[in-house]
């Protein structure tokens, strides 16, 4: 396996080669969850995807977007709750990082982060599928009386009713990413048992769904290359621009001390191919930049990005690399993205959790020791939540 990096325009791109098929891999400053299928498609109601369907994942990182511009004297005073830490990795290099929440070595209480869930509605016309993919619609994707947004709120990402364990260690009955983070820093949390980082969903009537009318040149409804049923497609570059515009036009409500999370239903973003299931980024740098995330929700048990797979990936990476600038000395991952190393596992590294009458599929995540931190910091001294992998990253 080899990695070749290059720079094209404003993009830093690394390609990991396994066999004869390249896989775009993480670089610089953004977390994109995707499949590397380098092909093109014609707009039609439900075209078959042509070309190779393996490998499944691509990771691509542009630099953080420009900081939000506020009128003089009206810039928000709040910042994302964050803390700074560090360790000496296995190669002797000093690693520093910034994460959401409070320092688990000094905090024994809960940090609450106001979280907005912003639905993204994609409208496809007669020339490219004639469907509207709306995460607020009841019964979408077989959810019966619930919408995707309602289902997400009942999932372990926002409902704190599930108990998570890491081997013999009980990480706690809490929201999934909160429980993961507790076991990530178990050496501190086993003493500071009150430590939590909680996403407080907040409904703001001013934050209407973001609706995108998709032209045939932008995307179409296709047969899902990675599951049953159909999905929509939309170019990543255009979507990123739309999200940035939305945040800028709502900056009185979306402020740096909040976490806006954009959610679509059954739409894969594309960038040279399909399929991107989510990403997180920041407008501006720490400590005052505006962080945010995007994920899609696919209601099919065989699909890429099924239920909370992609969403948990992005929230987990946002938590531990909030401003996408926690650089590490790993050949497979130049920044501290804790979901990437497990994406190549069966079922994309997901596991099952039962809550509120449904079986959910969050993605497992790696612990700090994967990046070269002392193994004494994490639960069981493991490098991943469920001992999914036992090796440290290549280069350590």
Image (cartoon, rainbow, N blue to C red):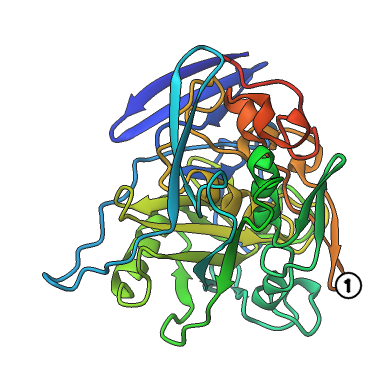
Q: Quarter of the image containing the N terminus?
A: top right
Residue found 33% across the figure and 66% down from its top: 78
Q: Position of residue 71 (x, y in %)?
A: 14, 71
Please give the name of the residue rendered at 46% of the width and 72% of the height, measured from the top-left corner. 213
381 vs 260, nearest the viewer: 381
Observer able to see residue 294 = yes
The image shows residue 253, relative to residue 233, as above or below, that is: below
Q: Where residue 217 sits: x, y (%)?
A: 44, 58
* Pick the front one: 298 or 175: 175
Name of the residue lying farthest toward the bottom: 205
Element under disc 1: loop
The residue beneath circle 1 is: 357
Residue that extends furthest to the left in the rendered view of this protein: 72
**165 to the left or right of 70:** right
Residue beneath the point at 47% across and 31% down: 86
The residue lying at 64 percent from left, 27 percent from top is: 370
Residue 365 position (above or below residue 87) = below
Q: Quadrant of the C terminus?
A: top right
Q: Please provide percent x and percent y for residue 295.
A: 58, 58
Q: Is residue 378 above or below residue 282?
A: above
């Amino acid at each position: 396996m080899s990695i070749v990096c290059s720079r094209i325009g404003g993009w830093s791109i690394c390609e990991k080669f396994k066999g004869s098929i390249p896989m775009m891999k993480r670089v610089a400053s953004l977390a994109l969850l995707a499949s590397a299928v380098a092909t093109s498609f014609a707009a039609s109601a439900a075209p078959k995807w042509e070309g190779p369907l393996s490998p499944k994942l691509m990771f691509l990182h542009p630099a953080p977007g420009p900081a939000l511009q506020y009128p003089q004297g009206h810039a928000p005073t709040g910042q994302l709750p964050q803390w700074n830490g560090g360790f000496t990795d296995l190669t002797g290099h000093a690693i520093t990082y910034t994460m959401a929440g409070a320092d688990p070595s000094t905090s024994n209480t809960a940090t609450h982060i106001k979280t907005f869930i912003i639905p993204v509605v994609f409208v496809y016309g007669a020339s490219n599928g004639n469907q509207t993919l709306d995460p607020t619609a009841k019964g979408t994707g077989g959810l019966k009386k619930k919408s995707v947004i309602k289902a997400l709120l009942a999932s372990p990402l926002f409902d704190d009713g599930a108990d998570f364990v890491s081997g013999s260690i009980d990480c706690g009955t809490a929201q999934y990413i909160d429980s993961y983070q507790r076991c990530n820093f178990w050496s501190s949390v086993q003493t500071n048992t009150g430590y939590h980082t909680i996403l407080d969903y907040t409904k703001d009537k001013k934050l209407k769904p973001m609706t995108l009318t998709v032209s045939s040149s932008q995307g179409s409804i296709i047969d899902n290359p990675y599951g049953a049923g159909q999905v929509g497609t939309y170019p990543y570059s255009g979507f990123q621009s739309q999200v940035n515009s939305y945040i800028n036009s709502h900056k009185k409500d979306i402020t740096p001390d909040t976490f806006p999370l954009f959610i679509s239903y059954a739409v894969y973003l594309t960038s040279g191919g399909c399929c991107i299931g989510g990403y997180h980024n920041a407008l501006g740098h720490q400590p005052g930049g505006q962080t945010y995330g995007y994920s899609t929700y696919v209601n099919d048990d065989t699909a890429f990005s099924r239920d909370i797979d992609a969403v948990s990936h992005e929230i987990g990476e946002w938590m531990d690399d909030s401003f996408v600038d926690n650089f590490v000395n790993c050949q497979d991952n130049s920044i501290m993205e804790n979901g990437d190393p497990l994406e190549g596992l069966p079922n994309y590294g997901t596991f099952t959790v039962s809550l509120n009458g449904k079986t959910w599929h969050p993605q497992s995540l790696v612990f700090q020791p994967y990046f070269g931190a002392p193994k004494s910091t994490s639960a069981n001294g493991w490098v991943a939540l469920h001992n999914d992998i036992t090796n440290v990253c290549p280069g350590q």
